[in-house]
Amino acid sequence: MTDPASTDAVILVGGRGTRLRPLTVSTPKPMLPTAGFPFLSHLLARIRAAGMRHVVLGTSFKAEVFESYFGDGSEWGLVIDYVVEEEALGTGGAIRNVLPKLRHDNAMVFNGDVLSGANLTEILATHVEKDADVTLHLVRVQDPRAFGCVPTDADGNVLEFLEKTPDPPTDQINAGCYVFKRSVIEQIPEGRVVSVERETFPGLLSAGAKIAGHVDTSYWRDMGRPDDFVQGSSDLVRGIAYSPLLEGKTGEAFVDDSAGIAGGVILVGGTAVGRGSDIGAGCRVDDSVIFDGVTIEPGAVVRGSIIAAGVRIGANTRIVDCVIGEGAQIGARCELQGGMRVWPGVVIPDSGVRFTPDA
């Protein structure tokens, strides 16, 4: 068995999160509030619980936000180093870019926008027991057509890497978590864009390297789209997806202690309510993520939506499946639905958007 404390954890958090705009205009995607905490906090807590101690964050967009929040990692029981990617290098290039900060012979690499319930110590054990050059976490999904598939042989060794196809030969997909031998990372070309799926892994297979697959059916979700972000946060709140930060706190809603909840409010579906937010009497908030400092006036309904910091929602307004950017003001008696995105600071007057004729 490997000692997790002798394994580096590398988290790639350099993406711009364009699919989640306008939330990511000023905030890196891994720092968006998710079930009461910045998303990255849940992953760091899992890394700490698995016994790893040294973390390297591969940053780029708004790199300073990460170090300002997490510091040297001591408050998390970790040692955190930071490497800034000055220009996009792809997954492989980003992994090579953190090499100078690595301390150990093995590194477990995470995509910073994946919510997973995988057992990290078991993935490490597979890597060591198979003496693999690289080990991939592969998760079985019900419909693999939207993903690249990774078939394995009877011994769990990876055979090839396939692009999206309407007729996948396997239900195993790349889950965005890898264990690399340091010597393999050293072979990745430096200072240019490198794709692990299209260049690094196929090249290793061609050279006879051993790439192992650790296959399971654990919880897995790419948090890159608004609907997945909402679902992932909801699943954390309800305990469907596990986070050490939420032990003993799961249920229909997670409400920060500083939030104000008036009488007759209904909070269900894994809703999360952030610091200093106020929800007025008679409101219903279902399956939504409410950031810090949000005001929702009496009688409003919010469902399946993300409401960014400092937003004000007027009385009797209805918001369904929407993203409301930071500091926006939505007037009373508005109706927003169907994937609408309101940009930061936008002001919509009372009854300014309706889908029914009565105002």
Image (cartoon, rainbow, N blue to C red):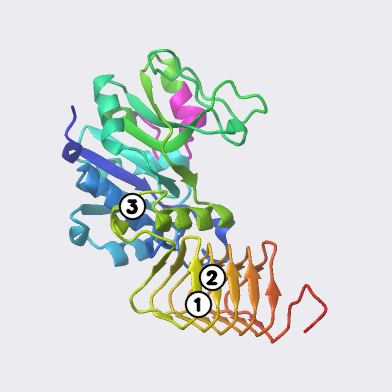
Q: Which residue is mark 3?
A: 243
Q: Quadrant of the C terminus?
A: bottom right
Q: Secondary structure at mark 1?
A: loop
Q: Which residue is mark 1?
A: 265
Under mark 1, the amino acid is Val
Graded by Cα atoms within 10 Å as few (under 14), some (14 to 19) or many (20 or more), the crowding at tag 1 reads some
Residue 92 visible from this viewpoint? no
Under mark 2, the amino acid is Val
| Disc nearest the viewer among 2 and 1 | 1
**Quarter location, residue 305:** bottom right
Graded by Cα atoms within 10 Å as few (under 14), some (14 to 19) or many (20 or more), the crowding at tag 3 reads many
Q: Which residue is mark 2?
A: 285
Residue depicted at x 45% and y 50%: 113
**Relative to residue 335, is residue 131 drawn left or right?**
left
Asked if residue 200 is among those painted magenta in the image, a careful observer would answer: yes
User: Real-space Cα distance between discs 3 and 2?
Assistant: 23 Å
Segment colored magenta: 186-202
